[in-house]
Image (spheres, rainbow, N blue to C red):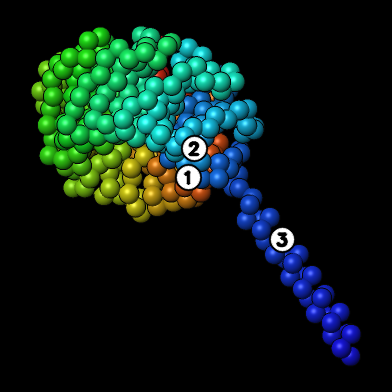
Amino acid sequence: MVKNLNRYTLYILLLCSIAWAIGCSKARQYPERVVWAFDTARDVDASPAVVDGRVYIGSDSKKLYCLDATTGESIWEFKAGGVMRSSPAVAGGYVYAGSHDHKIYCLKALDGSKVWEFETKGTVVSSPAVANGFVYIGSYDNRVYCLNAQTGAKVWEFETKGPIATTPAVSGNNVYVGCFDYRCYCIDARSGAKVWEFKTGNMVASSPAVVGGNVYFGSMDHKVYCLNGQTGARVWEFDTDQRILSSPAVHNNFVYIGSRNYKLYCLNAQTGSKVWEVKTDYYVVASPAVTGDNLYFGSWDNKFYGLNAKTGAKLWEFKMLGSKSSPAVSGGYIYVGGDDHRVYCLKASPGDAGSWPMFKGNAARTGSAPAG
């Protein structure tokens, strides 16, 4: 009797084990929209860059990864001394990114070998902007740096009164950057001299976009600002009633930006008037990507959204854990990181052949479609 009971117990345990294994297998299956997912073992707050069939992205694992854009397979990885939340810029065959270890790295895009490193005196979460042979980046040491893109040699530094978490935008001869000292600065790209500053009512953690001679950014004072790029004069402001950490994307005369009031806004770029708004179930701190009539963004409500950029109509949503990472779009696919440690490749909305290959659209970080 005892022997039969033991056999019966073992049989039940075996069935339970099989059922558990099947359940785990099903849990790991991804929805149809997912092409592949790559596990970095830590949160992915950085935004990807997609260039020449490769995805470059950093993680809290202290690594920068290069993945095959089609398969998600790892091509190479680079280990830094700290968390990598700085979104890489790819230009001229090189990858540039910052780290919590206070350093800015230049790697060969081909194999990930280090070309140079430059050490600041603070955490680097700012993402590099690359233009005209120079790298522009901020640090928590209250400085904006201009480095020679080939050698890493410092060309100039500009000192502010607070840490810099935003990503500079380079347009013409000017560099635009926001700061925790409540200001947005315009700096001469060649000399590092201040051209103008504009003071908001709170810290600026939203990276500026520069399109059509105007500068667009948000502030923790709840407002979206549009300034004249040459003078810093205020053109308009829009109040969202909550802090803004999201960086704007500008496309077809519209400004798209999220807020901690759970909403993503579409504003008229010339007047600041609201065109539409979409409410999610939690904070929107990631920045949107816009390609043609399609807009993509993530929310802290554990969802990633595809919208019609003209109307705000929801086309689809995808469940993923958190989203501070801003998406990149290339070849009909979306690439984005999540708090579940994964980098995702998702199918874009049908017919979307547009391109938004890296954070803020291009290596100069202007917040618009890729520069030519």
Q: Quadrant of the N terminus?
A: bottom right
x, y percent for residue 3: 89, 85
Marks 3 and 2, the one that precedes in the sequence:
3
Q: Residues within 10 Å of mark 3 (few under 14, many from 20)?
A: few
* Picture disc at residue 43: 1
x, y percent for residue 207: 28, 30
Marks 3 and 1, the one that precedes in the sequence:
3
**Which secondary structure, mark 2?**
loop
Q: Quadrant of the C terminus?
A: top left
Q: How many marks?
A: 3
Residue 60 vertical position relative to residue 18 in the rendered view, above or below: above
Q: CA–CA distance between discs 3 and 2?
A: 32 Å
Q: Are marks 3 and 1 in contact (CB under 8 Å)?
A: no
x, y percent for residue 223: 18, 39
Q: Are marks 3 and 2 in contact (CB under 8 Å)?
A: no
Q: Residue at x 84, y 82 (%)?
A: 6
- Pick out the residue farthest to the bottom: 1
Let me know if residue 361 appears in the view: no
| Res 235 quadrant in image | top left
Q: Residue at x 43, y 26 (%)?
A: 97
**Which secondary structure, mark 3?**
helix
Marks 1 and 2, the one that precedes in the sequence:
1
| Res 24 quadrant in image | bottom right
Q: Residue at x 68, y 55 (%)?
A: 25
Q: Which residue is mark 3?
A: 21
Q: Which residue is mark 2?
A: 62
Q: Residue flagged by tag 2: what amino acid is it?
A: Lys
Residue 354 vertical position relative to residue 300 in the rendered view, above or below: above
Q: Residue at x 12, y 31 (%)?
A: 199
